Amino acid sequence: MITHVATTDATVPGVKLVEPVHRALADRGLLPAEHYPDSGYPSAELIVGAQAAFGITLVTPLLTGTSRPYRENAGCQREAFTVDRDARRATCPQGATSRYRSPARQKGRDVIVVRFDQADCGPCPAGAACTNATRWGRQLTLRPRPLQELIDANHAAQEDRDWRAEYALRAGVEGTIRQAVAVTGSRRARYRGLAKTHLEHVYSAVALNLIRLDAWWNGQPLDRTRTSHLARLNLTLAA
């Protein structure tokens, strides 16, 4: 069921609405215990903030790195390194220890940059799969300890089959979005101005709720069963 409708300019990213939506639901006494946003929304700060401010657990995959070790799955991802916060150093899978560590700001976030020496990375047999750097060795970017621990725990949980089965509930949200587009034509606003467009969205949400309630009460599936092109071809050949 759709319990809240928010309308913004098209340039506003959806992640900016997570906190306002939670606040609006809190004002109406409708806060959920869990929220299943898609992978384009979450950050460690958002997960911590939702739990601290509203007691909501965000069940969502945090994106992993985009560097070459992640793209090629070469075994040199950050998670393969052992980080000793108390000793202020990291150890790579080959046993080398980092030589440099410094706090920094990247994209408006506090991070800790850990770097290995080129004297260790240059002759390393795994160096080519680990880093492209030629002037210095491998570099790791870490978040402050509480956020980094949350990120690591989330990444580990994402590999669990039970976690994936739980997150599959998100498919119901995607189905609602698809239904809104197919039934109410919500991809394009019929009116100008946020006020009128918001009213249109509210009417669309009411209509979708009635359709879904009717389907639930009558035991009817919301989507008709489809046969893929390949399945139809197989049936034709079999006939």
Image: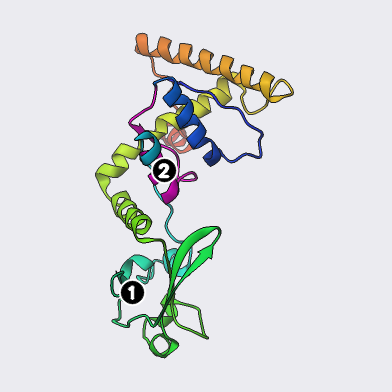
Which comes sooner in the sequence, label 1 or label 2? 2
Q: Which part of the image, by quadrant, shows the C terminus?
A: top left
Q: Position of residue 17 (x, y in %)?
A: 53, 35
Check residue 102 for magenta coloring: no
Label 2 sits on what residue type? Gly
Q: Position of residue 200 (x, y in %)?
A: 63, 18
Q: Nearer the viewer, residue 157 or 136?
A: 136
Q: Nearer the viewer, residue 169 or 224?
A: 169
Secondary structure beneath dot 1 equals loop
Residue 225 lies in what quarter of the image?
top left
Residue 96 lies in what quarter of the image?
bottom left
State whether residue 189 is above or below residue 167. Answer: above
Label 1 sits on what residue type? Arg
The residue labelled by disc 1 is: 88
Question: Which numbered circle lies on residue 59?
Answer: none
Left or right for 164, reference 222: left
Q: In this orientation, does residue 218 appear?
A: no
State whether residue 55 is above or below residue 105. Answer: above
Q: In this orientation, does residue 214 appear?
A: yes
Q: Which residues are magenta?
A: 30-51
The residue labelled by disc 2 is: 49
Q: Residue at x 33, y 31 (%)?
A: 33
Q: Nearer the viewer, residue 29 or 183?
A: 29
